[in-house]
């Protein structure tokens, strides 16, 4: 069973580094969806180190705004600006985009030339959901091809503690951890069919429709 662990809302010098140390401890890779305006000279070094380890660095917008309320020009700038920063640091242009707040519009799909990624989350941005509950939810329903949506936002130590519980169990169960790009491209699959789909699992095929 293949699982793609993903982390939103970094980079920072606290939780991002704690998550990275945990990944190294268990010899696994993950994907980080980063916010452009959090990247400076200091945090760019963290991104470079994580990328060199083999993790994916992908696009989570520049300002983490509700992009469905933005103009076409603003949408394009949010994404291109962040992609350019990532390319400068890692040498790789992002191929995936996670919309802030999973806030969507048809215009965003038209303007953003990346695969849209959501994921299965456990409300780990809610402080009242403690580490044990996060761990329980993570273990409850995991399927082959799942994209797991977690957050390395600054100070989110409960998610790190939850993963400390969960990762040894998943490893013992034989789960294989891959980056999002490995999940999508391991078998030379194309991205052409991805337009208009918000992926929680690699096998999703339903086009997004506005409410």
Image (spheres, grey):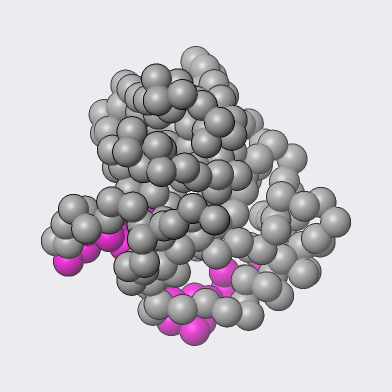
Q: Quadrant of residue 106?
A: top left
Viewer-proximal residue among 165 and 132: 132
| Residue 171 is covered by the magenta coloring | yes
Depicted 130 relative to depicted 48: above or below: below
Residue extending farthest right = 128
Residue 62: % across, % down: 50, 25
Name the residue at 56% across, 25% down: 63
Name the residue at 49% across, 53% down: 210
Q: Quadrant of residue 166?
A: bottom right
Tell me if 187 is positioned left or right of 2 in this view. Answer: left
Viewer-proximal residue among 108 and 168: 108
In this rendering, does residue 20 appear at all?
no
Give the residues drawn in magenta, as a range: 165-187
Name the residue at 26% across, 34% down: 92
Tell me if 65 is positioned left or right of 3 in this view. Answer: right
Quadrant of the frame with the C terminus: bottom right
Residue 15: % across, % down: 65, 42
């Amino acid at each position: 069973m293949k699982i793609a662990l993903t982390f939103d809302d970094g980079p920072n010098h606290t939780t991002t580094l704690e998550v990275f140390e945990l990944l190294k401890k268990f010899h696994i890779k993950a994907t980080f969806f980063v916010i452009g305006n959090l990247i400076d000279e200091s945090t760019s070094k963290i991104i470079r180190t994580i990328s060199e380890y083999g993790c994916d660095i992908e696009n989570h917008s520049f300002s983490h705004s509700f992009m469905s309320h933005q103009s076409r020009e603003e949408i394009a700038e949010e994404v291109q600006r962040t992609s350019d920063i990532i390319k400068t640091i890692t040498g790789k242009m992002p191929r995936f985009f996670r919309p802030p707040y999973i806030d969507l519009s048809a215009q965003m799909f038209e303007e953003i030339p990346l695969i849209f990624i959501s994921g299965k989350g456990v409300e780990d941005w809610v402080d009242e959901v403690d580490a044990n509950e996060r761990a329980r939810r993570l273990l409850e329903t995991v399927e082959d091809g799942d994209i797991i949506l977690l957050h390395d936002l600054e100070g989110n130590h409960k998610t790190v503690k939850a993963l400390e519980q969960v990762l040894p169990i998943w490893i013992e169960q034989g789960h294989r951890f891959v980056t999002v790009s490995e999940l999508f491209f391991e078998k030379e699959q194309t991205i052409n069919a991805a337009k208009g789909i918000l992926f929680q699992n690699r096998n999703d095929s339903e086009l997004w429709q506005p409410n």
